Image (spheres, grey):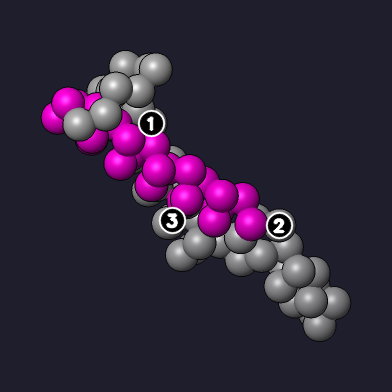
Amino acid sequence: MIKIIAVIMLIGGAISLVMGVLGIFGSIAPLMDPWALAILGFVFFIAGISMLKYRKDTDEVAVENRKA
């Protein structure tokens, strides 16, 4: 479950980051402020990567608890 949320955050952050950067440089006109999109995209992208990197999935934790 945690990895699914992390992948969703990673993909959503990447899309938001790209749209924000394109909005800052004038290639696209998003409905939101492009700086806000870029900053939120960066935050969600970094959070998704770190969750994928450092968190164990709930299934793995349940298996480890049964062994102990």
Which amino acid does the dot numbered 1 rest on? Leu
Q: Residue at x 26, y 29 (%)?
A: 28
Which amino acid does the dot numbered 2 rest on? Met
Dot 1 or dot 3: first in sequence order is 1
Residue 15 lies, in percent from the top left, at 40, 43
Dot 2 or dot 1: first in sequence order is 2
42 up-or-down from 65: above or below: above
For marks 2 and 1, give the CA distance.
22 Å
Q: Quadrant of the N terminus?
A: bottom right
Which label sits on residue 1?
2
Q: Which residues are magenta?
A: 4-26
Which label sits on residue 50?
3
Which amino acid does the dot numbered 3 rest on? Ser
Residue 9 lies, in percent from the top left, at 51, 46
| Quarter assignment of residue 4 | bottom right
- Seen from the viewer's position, the closer of residues 65 and 17 is 17
Q: Residue at x 81, y 82 (%)?
A: 67
Q: Secondary structure at mark 1?
A: helix
Q: Quadrant of the C terminus?
A: bottom right
Q: Is residue 51 left or right of residue 37?
A: right
- Seen from the viewer's position, the closer of residues 61 and 46 is 46
